Amino acid sequence: MRLTLARISEIAGQDPREMTSFASRDSGITELDDLSPCVNMVRIDLTKNAIKDLSGLAHNYHLSVIYASFNQIEDMSDLAKLKSARVIHLGGNNITTISGLENLTELRALVLNNNRITRAEGFGHLPHLNTIVLSHNPLSMPPVIRSFPKTLTKLALANTGLRAVPEDLGKHLPELQELSLNGNKILSIGDALTGCGRLRVLDLGNNLLHTLETLVSLKELSALSNLNIRGNPFKEAPESEQKSAADEATETASPAEGDADASETADEPNTATDTKSTPTPTALPWYTQFVTANVCPGLRILDGRRFDPGFLDRRRKRTLLAQKRKDPAAFKEVTKKLAKQDAAPAEGDNKKEPGMPKRDVDRAADRPASKGGRFEGKRSREQGGPSDRPEKRSRFQRPGQPQRPPRSDGDEQPPKPSKPAFGKSKMFSSEPVTSGAAREYGTRQPKRPPFHKKPGSFQPKRAN
């Protein structure tokens, strides 16, 4: 099928000259008509078709995002005049050489995975290019890192047949943050990554690394937090060391004893009929301790599994919450066990008296037994015995004033005065107004209000 302006209008339902984006995935398109009249077109998506060339887009100078992956394109030089292009996605085609990128000064991302490219060159001097994906290409020779722009932050060279890490990669790409070298034949790393101080994600899985000592050179990568070395034929540690490392990793990764399985990945089977012991998703590899101690002290993700304390604590809380919803009785038992573990005192700690602050535990231990603890006087008063501590004076009691006698259990509290009815206020009452403190301690009573007579007997003077 040939993609024409009429076909675009039929698919989108509007005038192609006014459209800013167009998408037609898996529509059986084989050829492109001249789409230059689409002057406002900024984004186009032609994924999963049978297009053989992009000559129809050669004069669409305003195109910024081009998706034409999984087609039959053999040449990408038709895009050489699109100076406004920022993202070009041509993965899954039949491209053999990289060409036509010299004038694309605004290009940010170039994705050319799953093609037939043999040489990684022809990038030119692109000042804004930060992402290059060349995975699954049969590179006949290692890429020349000097030809790559220094602004790169992401580089993917997985499954390209590399036998070594490109030399001086760290010196020529100092801004690199993500590097994928998965599925190659790399034997050692060496000092090729020295200088990548901002590298955060490194994928070295499914290579030919035999010893863990080859990873020691990664210690200089201070920002590295995600490392994948799964699938390498490492020489396994002795059984005792491997068992202790596995136990330590399991204790670190498992939420708690008696908790439900908190696995987040379901790709590994866990059935009772398996004869071999399959590792649980929460169990970390046996080399975790070596990597975190000698390679990457700040590592948070190893082989796709997180093991930092903050994440494990959050996962433990989510597991307890899920168990509470399913079985409240089992949740109570688990929380009791955890509470006992947290409240159990360590060996050599002093016993804490009830009500005693933590800072006074050591003081009480050094104090002689005859004088008693800090709260000895308080306990003696509660038990009815004599107290060594003087009685405290109330903050409302004046110096030299007699202390208020304690109220016995048999004394009844005086009833609270009821609220006067409407129209009868204390101002017109004949009863003296006294406070509770005045009645109790005999202090001076306040003066009566001026209108102390009954309302009926009060007669104001008439003016002459």
Image (cartoon, rainbow, N blue to C red):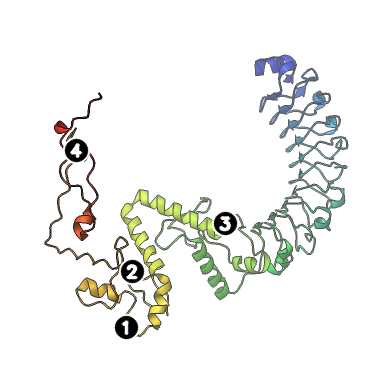
Q: Name the residue under label 2.
A: 355
Q: Name the residue under label 4.
A: 428
> Disc 2 on helix, strand or loop?
loop
Q: Which of marks 3 and 1 is in front?
A: 1
What residue is shown with label 1?
371
Q: Where is residue 451 in the image (x, y as percent from the top left)?
A: 21, 38
**Sequence-first disc among 2 and 4:** 2
Query: Which secondary structure lies at badge 4?
Result: helix
- Tell me the mark number nearer the camera, choosing from 4 and 1: 4
Q: Counting residues from the N terminus, which is met first, the one under dot 4 or under dot 1?
A: 1
Asked if labels 1 and 2 touch by Cβ distance under 8 angstroms, the answer is no
Q: Neighbour class for label 1 at 10 Å: few (<14), some, many (≥20)? A: few
Q: Mark 3 points at which residue?
A: 306
Residues at marks 3 and 4, CA–CA distance in whole angstroms: 80 Å
The vertical placement of 355 against 272, above or below, is below
Amino acid type at mark 3 = Arg
Amino acid on which disc 4 is placed: Phe
